Amino acid sequence: MMTRVFHLDPAKVSALKRTLLGNDSVVALAETFNVLGDTTRVRILDALARTELCVQDIARLLGLSESAVSHQLRLLRGMRLVRPRRAGRMVYYTLDDQHIVGLFEQGLEHVEEKARAPVARERAK
Amino acid sequence: MMTRVFHLDPAKVSALKRTLLGNDSVVALAETFNVLGDTTRVRILDALARTELCVQDIARLLGLSESAVSHQLRLLRGMRLVRPRRAGRMVYYTLDDQHIVGLFEQGLEHVEEKARAPVARERAK
DNA sequence: TGCACATATGAACAGTTGCTCATATGTGCA
DNA sequence: TGCACATATGAGCAACTGTTCATATGTGCA
């Protein structure tokens, strides 16, 4: 059992406050998760986790317009989650950080635990 | 070095396609990361990872309105990331899944690697 | 019962996001 | 050079999101 801590005890509040993540970490964390929080980007990163691909390949593989893919790659590049490599007129992309694979795996564990749970789902969508 | 795979080779495309995450997993993953992709929710979950807290406590701790906190808790409850416990008129919340802690840790590793990197930041915000 | 407090919810609004369409940039080859 | 192809970018727009403000629900206590 977890111990209750405070309710309206300002001393405890500020003690706890000091143990929390600092602002920069919070912002960076949320930014990272936010990038991963879109099905298109999850699909792109999942594909790139398996092999290097050029923009066209990704577009066809996932059934997206090349423009949409390029826009997303720009974002992912900006966050340095993927890295481009020019080869003639094509640009091949790869994952730039294997942590992403770990995050996906851990995220899937979470998802599977939730799927296993007995409580009814609320919003199908 | 990673081996290039295909460009416009339909057989390879469909072979690769079969190795990708299924639609349900992609959607669930993105949904999960999306919930974590907001500074307010990161802060709330970070606090709850340390101790059980009631709505008021969270609001004061993080400098948010009680309404805003309640709305976010509703969302987090819906995703079963937090769990409420009634005690009189107060409702205490706790983390409902320790995987979140792991995700935060792994996310922070990623963030710290990026912070260490030599490339210039583009958007400060 | 009725009042005060803790939480929850709904509507509304500003800010953000991901797409499409049009256009620009960059590269290879005749 | 000039044309075709691959990618990148910008504007614009519909959909979504997180907050506030107002109000509802739930609980303890006099």
Image (cartoon, coloured by chain):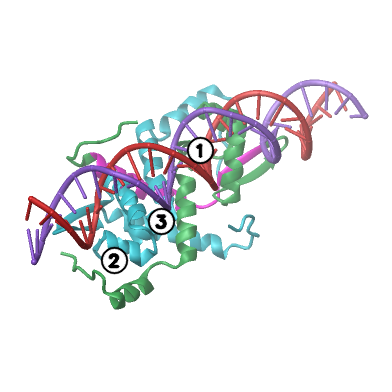
Chain colours: A green, B cyan, C red, D purple
What type of secondary structure mainly makes up the magenta span?
Answer: helix
Image coordinates of residue B70 in percent, x first then y, are 31, 52
Q: Chain of mark 2?
A: B
Q: Are labels 3 and 1 assigned to the same chain?
A: no
C-alpha distance separating marks 3 and 1:
27 Å
Q: Chain of mark 1?
A: A
Image coordinates of residue B101 in percent, x first then y, are 33, 59
C-alpha distance separating marks 1 and 2:
34 Å
**Dot 2 corresponds to which residue?**
B50
Q: Nearer the viewer, residue B2 or C5?
A: C5
- Residue for point 21% across, 40% down: A116
**Dot 3 corresponds to which residue?**
B40
Q: Nearer the viewer, residue A44 or B8?
A: A44
**Dot 1 corresponds to which residue?**
A44
Residue C13 located left or right of residue A112: right
- Residue for point 42% across, 29% down: B18
What quarter of the picture does the N terminus of chain A occupy?
A: bottom left
* Label 2 CA crowd tier, 10 Å (few <14, some 14–19, many 20+): some
- The amino acid sitting under disc 3 is Thr
Between tags 3 and 1, which lies in front?
A: 3
User: In which quadrant of the rendered view does residue A58 lie?
Assistant: top right
Between tags 2 and 3, which lies in front?
A: 3
The answer to whether residue A70 is magenta is no
What range of the chain is rendered magenta?
Answer: A91-115
The answer to whether residue A95 is magenta is yes
- The amino acid sitting under disc 2 is Arg
